[in-house]
């Protein structure tokens, strides 16, 4: 079993900054792509930022130049640095990762999508 746990959300004024953190824990054999998604009230979930295992990154147009995703392989962690926040960034932010988990046999299974529980980010105007 494995899990993703996010932290770092909160309330901030327009123009402020927050840093979200996501830690993967459990019987992890390897971690593939990792990303951050968000869901605002009444809207669908959208991908905000994405990083591959090799370090390539991609961002939604709405956050380019303001958000930075990074990962620390040694700590099984992915971060999202959010600067110059706007009210439209208000949402629940979710961490996502493709994990290979060691099963009961002691062997790693296939890559499976895991999601964190979400952390609320609120930007006041």
Image (tube, rainbow, N blue to C red):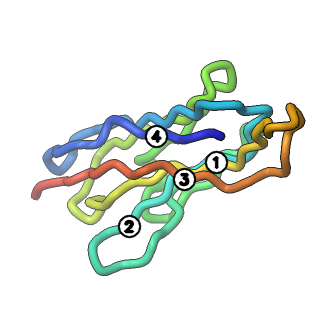
Checking the image for residue 80, the label placed there is 4
Residue depicted at 57% across the width and 30% down the height: 77
Location of the N terminus by quadrant is top right
Residue depicted at 63% across the width and 31% down the height: 26
Front residue of 1 and 122: 1
Kindly give the residue lying farthest to the top in the view shown.
74
| Whole-number angstrom distance, CA of label 1 to CA of label 2 | 17 Å
- Secondary structure of the residue carrying tag 4 is strand
Instruction: Work out whether mark 4 precedes mark 3 in sequence or the reverse, and give the earlier one.
Output: 4
Instruction: Work out whether mark 2 precedes mark 4 in sequence or the reverse, and give the earlier one.
Output: 2
Q: Quick check: marks 2 and 4 in contact, CB under 8 Å?
A: no
| Whole-number angstrom distance, CA of label 1 to CA of label 3 | 7 Å
- Secondary structure of the residue carrying tag 1 is strand
Binning the other alpha carbons within 10 Å of mark 4 as few (below 14), some (14 to 19) or many (20 upward) gives many
Location of the C terminus by quadrant is bottom left
Q: Quick check: marks 1 and 3 in contact, CB under 8 Å?
A: no
Mark 3 lies on residue: 115
| Whole-number angstrom distance, CA of label 2 to CA of label 4 | 15 Å
Q: Position of residue 86 (x, y in %)?
A: 25, 57
Mark in front: 4 vs 1: 1
Checking the image for residue 97, the label placed there is 1
Mark 2 lies on residue: 39
Instruction: Work out whether mark 1 precedes mark 3 in sequence or the reverse, and give the earlier one.
Output: 1
| Whole-number angstrom distance, CA of label 4 to CA of label 3 | 15 Å
Q: Position of residue 55 (x, y in %)?
A: 72, 38
Binning the other alpha carbons within 10 Å of mark 2 as few (below 14), some (14 to 19) or many (20 upward) gives some
Tell me where residue 38 sits by quadrant: bottom left
Instruction: Work out whether mark 1 precedes mark 2 in sequence or the reverse, and give the earlier one.
Output: 2
- For this view, does 119 lie left or right of residue 62? left
Mark in front: 2 vs 3: 3
Front residue of 101 and 74: 101
């Amino acid at each position: 079993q494995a899990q993703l746990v996010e932290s770092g959300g909160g309330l901030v004024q327009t123009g402020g900054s927050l840093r979200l953190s996501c830690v993967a824990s459990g019987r992890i054999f390897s971690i593939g792509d990792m990303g951050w998604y968000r869901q605002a009230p009444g809207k669908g979930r959208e991908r905000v930022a994405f990083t591959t295992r090799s370090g390539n990154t991609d961002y939604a147009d709405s956050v380019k130049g303001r958000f930075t995703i990074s990962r620390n392989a040694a700590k099984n962690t992915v971060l999202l640095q959010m600067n110059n926040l706007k009210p439209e960034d208000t949402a629940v932010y979710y961490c996502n990762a493709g994990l290979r988990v060691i099963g009961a046999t002691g062997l790693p299974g296939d890559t499976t999508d895991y999601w964190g529980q979400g952390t609320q980010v609120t930007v006041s105007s």
